[in-house]
Amino acid sequence: MDKRKIIIDTDCGSDDAMAMAMALNDPDYEILMFTTVAGNVSRKQATANTLTTIKVAGSCCPPVYEGCSEMLLRNWVGAAETHGNDGMGDIGLVDYALQPAKGHAVLKMLEAIEQNEPKTIDIIALGPLTNLALAIRLAPETMKNVRRLVVMGTAGLGVGNVSPVAEFNIWQDAEAAKIVTDFGFDELVYVGWDACLDEAMLNEQEIEEIRSSGELGRYCIDSNRVLMEMNRDRFGVPCLDMADPAAMAAALYPECIEACDKYYCQVDVSGGPSYGGVLVDYYHFSGQKENAWICSKLNPQKYKEYIFRTLHVR
């Protein structure tokens, strides 16, 4: 059986790193490339974190291409309070010998889509959608050949994590998210922040099990130490809401999806207090054609089993 081909677009912070390690260790998929974008951290830092994660994962070495360093219209805003200044919990992961491949991420992404049969490549986006929006503007006919786009983004059917209504990745570049949402992909799946909450969060015992499993598990947990401390204040217990691993699991192991329905969705770019929020027409008031799937819940057991399997915990 041929491996399904994927491209992973990332603003590599600590939860991206765990998600990427999962994909790198899933033998059913061929990662054609990683593309980096500013989001949790600067593009340069995201690239360094991506390269380090590939090295620690120790399975295969897809090329890493650098993409956009700024949002389409707004200035980049990082997430040091969530992931640390370096996006990896400030645990000092630096390897200056690692270098990205030559070429711009957006152009390399388009090149890969053009060189493969139509509808044979999935894109998994773990950060702001700036690279994807630019690709759509540059080559819309090429982007129509993407089989499926899975995005960690939106609040799903819940509340936001950066404003009452907005989730960070969409809020960071809502104009880009609007371009992507309105484009008309055959299959656009948003995995909401709500999909990684409640029983889907990693509890203290599960965190320790992953950490004690070896170098990769230790890397994935230690890099999330800032997020864990934030969650101790936010949720009252040490736990991890792993948004990007939830999106990766939904993309690569759809058997773990418990709630995912298609709606008409609209991204707020008004600039007001709801900027970056995604209106999900749950009751179909608008009469508009559904344009995106919203994955709002994963089966906790299946989801965590996939994490443990791909991180070589069990």
Image (cartoon, helix red, strand yellow):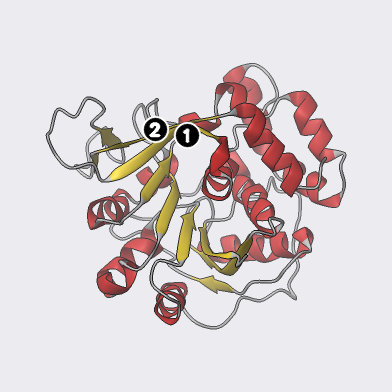
Circles 2 and 1, Cβ within 8 Å, touching? The answer is: yes
Q: Earlier in the sequence, mark 2 or mark 1?
A: 2
The quadrant of the image that shows the C terminus is top right
Which residue is outermost to the left?
287
Q: Residue at x 41, y 72 (%)?
A: 106
Q: Quadrant of residue 89?
A: top right
**Kind of residue at disc 2:** Gly
The residue lying toward the viewer, choosing from 280 and 6, is: 6
Instruction: Please indicate, yes or no, whether residue 230 appears anywhere in the rendered image.
Output: yes
Q: Residue at x 58, y 44 (%)?
A: 249
Q: Which mark is residue 193?
A: 1
Secondary structure of residue under mark 1: helix
Q: Nearer the viewer, residue 9 or 41?
A: 9
SS class, disc 2: loop
Say above or below: 160 vs 128.
above
Residue 83, horizontal then vertical, whole percent: 61, 43
Badge number at residue 156: 2
Rendered view: 260 above or below 37: above
Local crowd size for mark 2, using a 10 Å CA cut-off: few (<14), some (14–19), many (≥20): many
Q: Residue at x 68, y 55 (%)?
A: 26
* Residue 201 seen from this side: no
What label does residue 77 carry, if any? none
Mark 2 to mark 1 CA distance (whole Å): 6 Å
Along the horizontal axis of the image, is 232 left or right of 57? left
Q: Is residue 201 left or right of residue 221?
A: left
Give the residue at x 13% y 33%.
286
The residue nearer to you, when weighing 10 against 272, is 10
Occupied quadrant, residue 161: top left
**What's the residue type where badge 1 is placed?**
Trp
